[in-house]
Image: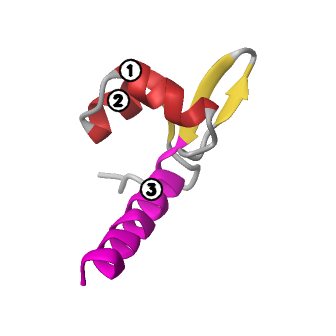
Amino acid sequence: MAERQAETRPTIMTLEEVAKYLRLHKSTVYRMAREGKLPGNKVAGQWRFKKDKLVEWFEEQQKIQDELLG
C-alpha cells in the first residue's frame, strides 16, 4: 500500500474555520482581522488565514500575556 505523503502546502482557513478553531464569534474574528490584530489576507474580497501563522500569533499572544502577568 502506498504511503500517503504529508501535506506540504500551508493550510488555508476561512473566517468561519478560524472562528471555530479559536472558539470566537465570526464577527470577532472579522473585526480583529480588519484591525490588523489577527494575521490574515483578503482574497477576492474574502478573508483567508494560514493556520501556521495563526499558531505563531497565538503563541506570541501567550508570551505577551505571561510577561504581563509574570
Query: Residue reaching furthest right?
Result: 44
Q: How does the figure colour the protein chain or chains?
A: secondary structure
Which percent across, then down, holds residue 46? 64, 18
Span shown in magenta: 50-70
Which percent across, then down, holds residue 57? 48, 59
| Secondary structure found at label 1 | helix
Which mark identifies residue 26?
Answer: 1
Q: Amino acid at mark 3?
A: Gln
For label 3, the crowd category at 10 Å Cα-Cα, with few meaning under 14, some 14 to 19 and many 20 or more, is few
User: Residue at 60% of width from left, 25% of height from top?
Assistant: 47
Q: Can residue 14 be seen from the camera position used here?
A: no
Q: Are marks 2 and 3 in contact (CB under 8 Å)?
A: no
Q: Which residue is mark 3?
A: 5
Q: Which residue is mark 2?
A: 19
Q: Amino acid at mark 2?
A: Ala
Which percent across, then down, holds residue 48? 59, 31
16 in the magenta segment: no
Q: Can residue 54 be seen from the camera position used here?
A: yes
5, above or below 28, in the image = below
